[in-house]
Image (cartoon, rainbow, N blue to C red):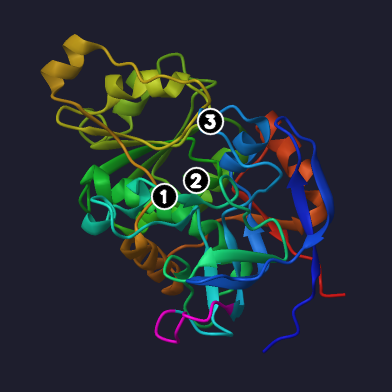
Amino acid sequence: MPNIPTEQWAQVIEKVGGPVEYKKIPVAKPGPGEVLVNIKYSGVCHTDLHAVNGDWPIPTKLPLVGGHEGAGIVVARGDDVTDDVCKIGEAVGVKWLNDSCLSCTFCQQADEPLCLTPKLSGYTVDGSFQQYAIASAKHVAHIPDGVPLDEVSPVLCAGITVYKGLKESGVRPGQSVAIVGAGGGLGSLAQQYAKAMGLKVIAIDSGEEKKSMSEKMGCDAFIDFAKSSDITKDVRAATNDGLGPHAVILVAVNEKPFQQAAEYVRPRGTVIVIGLPANAYIRAPVFESVLKMVRIQASYVGNRQDSAEALDFFARGLIHAPFKTVDLKDLPDVYEKMHKGQIAGRYVLKMPDPE
């Protein structure tokens, strides 16, 4: 049994709107069905910023430790957790869905994210912006041996989420997908998964840094929405037959792209809504959408099987999403860059070394 301290460093929100305070808090003990994970790295998601701002209709717990892309090692577990569920010393991921009941109608049909009584990491329960985090033993992601914990941490939310969205879209190898918000944390991973699934990728974002990164990700075309005078025309022109992409994956952080996608997706195409801009709405032209038989569908985080599949893509070397590592204490700087839209790829927080 590892030596577990009684206190740890964490980033804590005491009230809605922040600030985020870097301070020491007690280390929790795992209860029945739970494990204690020594977090080594944690990705930073836009959801974490929404938790700070309190601009979603679901209230957070307060005080709150944010974060839901935590990769680390199991160091303790509840008395009823057996080796076949989760082992001491095993590398695992703490995901957005920290726990679900596994007995409601949705859990029973493998829709655990739709559980009627979920626990959400970094939102309704404390998350991964701390050195030691509690998670359900049945819901942690099992990270394959040899996988680097810093690089895999963004996969635990962003990767699983976009992989699930691509599955939900029904696109097949050889078809095309437009990814809106392609240069962000979700978008950079969506490009990688799309290419690994044999799809042609149209990356939509703005700025030279995001264009350069998208080209390195292997996109087949990049469209800068800030420079485009007709986004619908440009997206359609980027497809081989000029009819538009077979699917659109919306991971943007503002509302406008959500109003445009149905206009340039091809007939019988699918628009997958993933991004969650605060107070945003989905609108589409009824006449054109009906005549084109466009399907608009939302997609939430993946279930446990989706998580395992998304991690397998990574373990096989098919996913190499860009990320930058900074110390846990530097989280406010990351949030400031998010506010300004200055992040290409993902930021990953490194936990402080044991004292």
- Tag 1 residue: 161
Percent x, y of residue 220:
38, 44
Extreme right residue here? Answer: 355
Percent x, y of residue 135:
54, 64
Is 28 left, or right, of 114 in this rendering? right
| Magenta-colored span | 77-85
Q: Is residue 218 visible?
A: no
Q: What distance separates the C-alpha of mark 3 from that of mark 1?
A: 15 Å
- Asked if the residue at tag 2 contacts the one at tag 1, i.e. Cβ–Cβ closer than 8 Å, the answer is yes
**Tag 1: amino acid:** Thr
**Tag 2: amino acid:** Leu
Name which residue lies at 47% across and 32% down. 276
- Tag 2 residue: 186
**Tag 3: amino acid:** Val
Is 313 left, or right, of 344 in this rendering? left
Q: Quadrant of the N terminus?
A: bottom right
Q: Residues within 10 Å of mark 3 (few under 14, many from 20)?
A: many
- Tag 3 residue: 253
Q: Quadrant of the C terminus?
A: bottom right
Q: Secondary structure at mark 1?
A: helix
Percent x, y of residue 111:
28, 52
Does 329 lie within the magenta span? no
Q: Is residue 326 visible?
A: yes
Residue nearest the observer in this picture, 124 or 273: 124
